[in-house]
Image: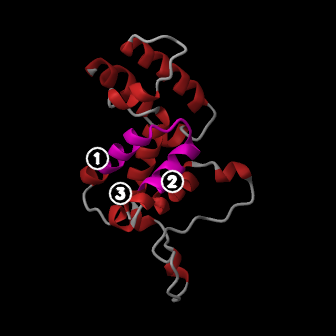
């Protein structure tokens, strides 16, 4: 397993915040599944989902979600909250403001995906101090849901934390 973390995951996660919203993510995911099949010695037609969890390996989509959430959590002071624009006591005043966009390509950027994921976290998780504690909590959730797409990561995180409340 140390081979995987040293040679594979380190290369996948390098700069994933910036290239992860592009078109190459699915191709990298296919290669990652091929590597998991080699490590677990399973057939090409066997689903890898349970093997990701049992080997404690995040999918490339999980790595992308983890990196983006970490980036936002560390730099939270650089973002605007919905409550910064008015004084009304709304439900979403403590959530980050997602910038308005008119093009679908802007909606697929790491900033918009990250803000949606971060807003789907419960207030207790967003209030966690210390990046290592935040990272381990999010990683544990992503290992449980094992996302096979960005949307699955967003929905899985949202569903998980709704069930926890």
Q: Which residue is drawn at 55% across and 22% down?
A: 30
- Looking at marks 2 and 1 on the same chain, the residue that comes earlier in the sequence is marked by 2
Q: Residue at x 25, y 50 (%)?
A: 132
- Mark 3 or mark 1, which is nearer to you? 1
Magenta-drawn stretch, dominant element (helix, strand or loop): helix
- Looking at marks 3 and 1 on the same chain, the residue that comes earlier in the sequence is marked by 3
Secondary structure state at the residue bearing disc 3: helix
Secondary structure state at the residue bearing disc 2: helix
Q: How many labels does the image show?
A: 3
Q: Give the range drawn in magenta.
A: 135-160
Q: Quadrant of the N terminus?
A: top left
Which of the numbered marks, if any, corresponds to residue 158?
none
- Magenta-drawn stretch contains 118: no
Image position, residue 62 (x, y; %): 45, 39
In the image, 54 versus 119, the foreground residue is 54
Q: In which quarter of the image is the C terminus?
A: bottom left
* Residue matched to label 1: 136
Q: Is residue 29 left or right of residue 69?
A: right
Q: Residue at x 47, y 33 (%)?
A: 60
Dot 3, how many residues are within 10 Å of its Cα: few (below 14), some (14-19), or many (20+)? Answer: few
* Residue matched to label 3: 74
- Mark 2 or mark 3, which is nearer to you? 2
Dot 1, how many residues are within 10 Å of its Cα: few (below 14), some (14-19), or many (20+)? Answer: few
The image quadrant that residue 26 belongs to is: top right
């Amino acid at each position: 397993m140390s081979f995987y973390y040293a040679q594979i995951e380190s290369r996948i996660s390098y700069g994933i915040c910036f290239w992860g919203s592009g078109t190459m993510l699915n191709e990298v995911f296919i290669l990652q599944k091929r590597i998991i099949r080699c490590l677990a010695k399973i057939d090409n037609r066997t689903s890898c989902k349970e093997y990701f969890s049992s080997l404690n390996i995040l999918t490339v989509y999980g790595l992308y979600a983890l990196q983006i959430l970490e980036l936002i959590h560390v730099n939270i002071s650089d973002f605007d909250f919905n409550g910064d624009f008015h004084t009304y006591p709304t439900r979403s005043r403590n959530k980050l403001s997602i910038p308005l966009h008119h093009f679908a390509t802007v909606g697929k950027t790491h900033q918009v995906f990250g803000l949606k994921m971060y807003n789907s976290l419960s207030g207790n998780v967003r209030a966690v101090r210390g990046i290592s504690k935040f990272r381990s909590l999010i990683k544990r959730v992503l290992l449980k849901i094992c996302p096979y797409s960005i949307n699955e990561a967003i929905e899985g995180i949202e569903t998980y934390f709704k069930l926890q409340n």
